[in-house]
Amino acid sequence: MRLRPSMVEVRRIDASLLPPIRHAVLWPSVAIEAQLQPFDHADTTIHYGAFVAENQKPTGCITLTHEGYKGDLPPAIAGTMQGQYQVHKFAVMQDYQGQGIGLVLFRHVLEHLQQLAAKPILLHLDARVEQKGWYQRFGLQVLDQEKFTKNGPTGNGPPVEYIRLGIMLH
């Protein structure tokens, strides 16, 4: 069953609400107390949570940092930008996946950044390879063809293959 977007409330949340979601969805092999990263506590970081009526805890989360892209940008994207933002640790609890909560969360981030965009803004992220098509539905493009592996936030988790994606917002 898909939830109507009006049934999902997205609001800013404190980093302390993130570890249970990240642990359950992204890195279950990494201890819950190791789920937060230094960027989670930066003044320029924003955490959003998705809430549905029957649950007062967030059912999903996404983290947005004011962070530059670390690779070489394709010539079509490189140029004058107001800023660069990166999505980190985007997750929806398993019981709520497939109901449109991720769509609402990601659209919220895109709308937030478009409101800031007096000049173009680059939104970029490291996407799990199997999620690449999901992000491309929003217009994100591959920024670097090279795939790479991450082993969780502590480096001790199982290997997961990623690819870098991005979109220019105006």
Image (spheres, grey):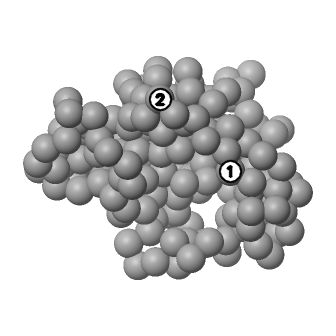
Residue 81 in view of the camera? yes
Amino acid type of disc 1? Lys
Residue 85, given in percent of the width and then of the height, sits at: 36, 54
Label at residue 145: 2
Picture disc at residue 45:
none
User: Dot 2, how many residues are within 10 Å of its Cα: few (below 14), some (14-19), or many (20+)?
Assistant: few
Q: Where does residue 11 sit, x and y in percent of width and height?
A: 51, 58
**SS category of the residue bearing label 2:** strand
- Picture residue at 82% right of the left edge, 69% below the top: 32
Determine whether, in the image, residue 137 is placed left or right of residue 3.
left
Q: Which residue is mark 1?
A: 150
- Left or right of 98: which side holds 104? left
Amino acid type, residue under disc 2 in the picture: Gln
Q: On screen, 162 above or below 21?
A: above
Task: Name the residue rendered at 61%, 41% in the picture.
Answer: 148
Q: Residue 169 appears in which quarter of the rendering?
A: top left
All told, the count of numbered labels is 2
Between discs 2 and 1, the one toward the N terminus = 2
Secondary structure beneath disc 1?
Answer: strand
Residue 130, horizontal then vertical, whole percent: 67, 27
Quadrant location of the N terminus in the rendered image: top right
At horizontal 16% and vertical 55% (from top left) the residue drawn is: 82
The spot of residue 166 in percent (x, y) is 38, 37
